[in-house]
Image (cartoon, rainbow, N blue to C red):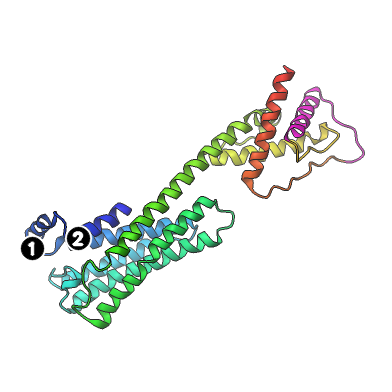
């Protein structure tokens, strides 16, 4: 996606490839490179918008139909012009050129505004979202939305000011800032995802002793899951479920402040369950709930309990 955006700017810059681009245009008999550049830009913009909306968990059904409609309008205008549409700076004021460039810039304006706005909104209000995702989305949102005024300015040139006002290369600084923000934001997201994945694997490993013991007692309650993230969720749920099932084999609720004490509770309850020794009481023991509100905090707590339980179980062998 970002490679496509970079490619569109490369194709419109006076680089050492310029003579080769001129040869391609001469071979085609019309400004082929400009057409390819804008087609790639539309597809890249749609991909960018779809990505940001997906991360923010917003509907993306409108993105690709809008991109397709934009390409159809541009193609129609290009045919109507006799395949003479090239750079915006070379626009001669023709209606076909105006329609072509307006459709293109309008799509970019919508893409920059919606993708940038959704990213910033998600970064500001995404409660329950990991901090690295919110930081990455904030950087990506800033890098995207700064290009929105550029698209509006070009639309003003096309619809109001007329030919000769817009000059190529005058917004390279803003475009460069967008690419830097895109790279920085993507790095934050990727590094955060790698760290989160490593943390999930570590927590799964920590939970294994206690979860294995719980699964041996209540195998019918264990549900295999395909991904590490889903396995972690299931392990936490199944351990808590097993704790509720073991409540009848311990006179007291499981402690929620000391991992060692909680591990000893599980060891005692599991031993009583194995011996078939349920606890006689006038009421039903209900496991107390801790003050942890975040799921990862709950998983970390149970991981500490599980590791303590592993040491207790090893000492009992």
Q: Quadrant of residue 81?
A: bottom left
Secondary structure mostly taken by the magenta-highlighted segment of the chain? helix
Q: Quadrant of residue 48?
A: bottom left
Q: Nearer the viewer, residue 99 or 299?
A: 299
> How far separated are the C-alphas under marks 2 and 1?
20 Å
- Judge whether 309 appears above or below 290 on screen: above
Task: Kindly give the residue lying farthest to the bottom in the view shown.
Answer: 160
Query: Which label was assigned to residue 13?
Result: 2
Q: In this view, does 146 lie to the left or right of 226?
A: left
- Judge whether 213 appears above or below 300 on screen: above
Q: Is residue 7 highlighted in magenta?
A: no
Query: What residue is shown at x 70% (from left), y 33% (from top)?
Result: 305
Q: Which of 99 and 149 is in front in this view?
A: 149
Quadrant that contains the C terminus: top right
Q: Position of residue 313 (x, y in %)?
A: 71, 23
Q: In this view, does 280 lie to the left or right of 80?
A: right
Query: Which label was assigned to residue 29?
Result: 1
Query: What residue is shown at x 18% (from left), y 78% (from top)?
Result: 164
Q: Which of pointers 2 and 1 indicates the residue nearer the eye?
A: 2
Give, as a single range, the part of the protein colored magenta.
259-283
Q: Position of residue 303 (x, y in %)?
A: 65, 35
Q: Position of residue 43 (x, y in %)?
A: 30, 59
- Judge whether 309 appears above or below 84 on screen: above
Q: Which of 62 and 197 is in front in this view?
A: 197
């Amino acid at each position: 996606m970002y490679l496509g955006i970079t490619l569109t700017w490369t194709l419109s810059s006076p680089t050492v490839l310029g003579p080769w681009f001129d040869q391609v245009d001469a071979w085609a008999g019309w400004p082929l490179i400009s057409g390819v550049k804008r087609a790639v830009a539309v597809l890249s913009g749609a991909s960018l918008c779809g990505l940001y909306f997906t991360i923010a968990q917003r509907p993306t059904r409108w993105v690709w139909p809008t991109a397709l409609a934009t390409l159809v309008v541009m193609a129609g205008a290009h045919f109507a012009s006799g395949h003479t549409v090239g750079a915006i700076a070379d626009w001669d004021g023709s209606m076909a050129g105006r329609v072509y460039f307006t459709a293109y810039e309008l799509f970019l304006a919508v893409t920059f505004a919606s993708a940038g706005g959704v990213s910033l909104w998600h970064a500001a209000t995404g409660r329950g979202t990991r901090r690295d995702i919110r930081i990455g989305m904030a950087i990506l949102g800033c890098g995207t939305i700064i290009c929105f005024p550029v698209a509006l300015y070009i639309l003003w040139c096309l619809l109001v000011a007329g030919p000769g006002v817009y000059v190529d290369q005058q917004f390279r600084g803003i475009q460069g800032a967008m690419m830097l923000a895109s790279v920085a934001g993507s790095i934050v997201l990727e590094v955060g995802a790698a760290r989160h994945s490593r943390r999930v694997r570590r927590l799964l490993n920590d939970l294994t002793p206690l979860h294995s013991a719980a699964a041996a007692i209540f195998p019918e309650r264990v549900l295999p899951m395909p991904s590490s993230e889903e396995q972690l969720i299931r392990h936490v749920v199944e351990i808590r479920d097993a704790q509720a099932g073991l409540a009848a084999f311990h006179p007291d609720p499981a402690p929620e402040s000391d991992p060692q004490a909680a591990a000893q509770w599980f060891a005692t309850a599991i031993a009583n369950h194995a011996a078939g020794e349920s606890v006689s009481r006038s009421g039903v023991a209900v496991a107390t709930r801790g003050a942890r509100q975040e799921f990862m905090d709950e998983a970390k707590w149970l991981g500490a309990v599980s590791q303590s339980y592993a040491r207790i179980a090893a000492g009992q062998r």
